[in-house]
Amino acid sequence: MNQPELRDPRYLYKTDGFDKQDQETPALQAKMRPEPDCGEKSYQGHDKLLNRRVLITGGDSGIGRATAIAFAREGADVAIQYLPGEEPDAEAVAELVRAAGRQALLLPCDFKDVDVVTDLVDRTIAEFGGIDTLVLNAGQQISQPSLAKLPIEQVRATFEVNIVAMFALAQAALPKMPAGSSIVTTTSIQAYAPSGHLLDYAATKAAIKNFTINLAAEAAEKGIRVNGVAPGPIWTPLQLDQGQPIEALPKFGQDTLLKRAGQPAELAPVYVFLASNDASYVTAQIYVYGVTGGGVIN
């Protein structure tokens, strides 16, 4: 008799913490120890996003990279926004997209300059002939020990990258997206259970949660769905680019019920589902899709 393929989630990937390490900004996935699993070898597509025209922000590494790989293998053409300086990671993703037989468009852009943000939508449309899927994933996360040590310049930059750019992109894209399109945002467990050392980051993630639900009401009038994903501790370059105190890395993710950090590859199927026609009756949702290893978000 054939046996089911079952995988114990406690023992997938790395379970014993991570080495102390950091990188200069911007951090690159290729230099991480170990490198995150973004589904490069494992993700198998089933044409769930055939001929979709997608723009993913922060698509060069981590969650965005895993989403870009999965979307391409599901049949989508993918435009990838990334921070200048992250070219090695971005070019590696573009190669994987093209290996899946789809078009890739690389869009370097610093979201701290909000005036250049809306050009990303126009360039995606020019390259692919339209846009019907928008994944708003880019983020800045910089750990500070206390409010007293938190520079106001950092607060402004974190809000510009994490939420102001999201407003600008949605504003530019929504009028040009046809009925049946999908917008997916990346919020965080930090929106529900904030950490004191991520005061500004957590505040933006709460704002993204609110933004997602509000935008869904307006977009529904056009037949466009808007949902968000709230990840928990995921092993990405964000953690090494001042996102966590270096001394915290050996224990990163081990306080979850599954006793380990998550990998970007474990999130990609959620983004695929939310973007696809399988989620035709799903909009204005976030808490249902908390990929947190057991962390509570409701």
Image (cartoon, helix red, strand yellow):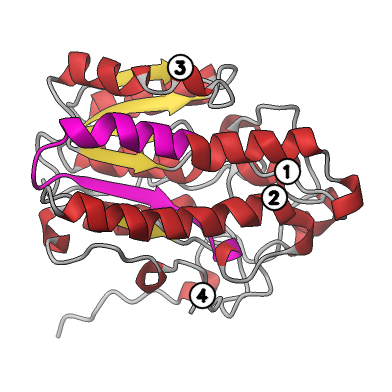
Name the mark on residue 116: 3
* Residue at the (40%, 41%) spot, across then down: 136
Image quarter hosting the N terminus: bottom left
> What is the residue that sits farthest to the bottom in this orientation?
1
> Residue 68, percent across and down?
33, 37
Give the mark nearest the N terminus, 4 or 1.
1
Pointer 3 or 4: first along the chain: 3
Q: Is mark 4 on a helix, strand or loop?
A: loop
Q: In this view, does 123 lie above or below 283?
A: above
The crowd level at tag 3 (other Cα within 10 Å; few <14, some 14-19, many 20+) is few
* Residue in the picture at 14% in, 66% down: 281
Disc 1, SS: loop
Residue type, label 4: Ile
Q: Quadrant of residue 78?
A: top left
The first of marks 2 and 3 along the sequence is 3
User: Label 2, label 3: how many angstroms apart (C-alpha)?
Assistant: 23 Å
Q: Distance between the residues labelled 3 and 1?
A: 23 Å
Residue 297 bears which disc, if any?
4
128 displayed left or right of 294: left
Q: Residue at x 10, y 40 (%)?
A: 50
Magenta residues, start to end: 165-190
Residue 170 forms part of the magenta stretch: yes
Front-most of residues 114 and 78: 114
Q: Do the residues labelled 3 and 1 touch (CB within 8 Å)?
A: no
Choose the circle earlier in sequence order: 4 or 2. Answer: 2
Q: Nearer the viewer, mark 3 or mark 4?
A: 3
Foreground mark, 4 or 2? 2
| Residue linked to disc 2 | 200
Q: Which of the labelled discs sits on residue 142, or is there none?
A: 1
Type of residue at label 3?
Answer: Val
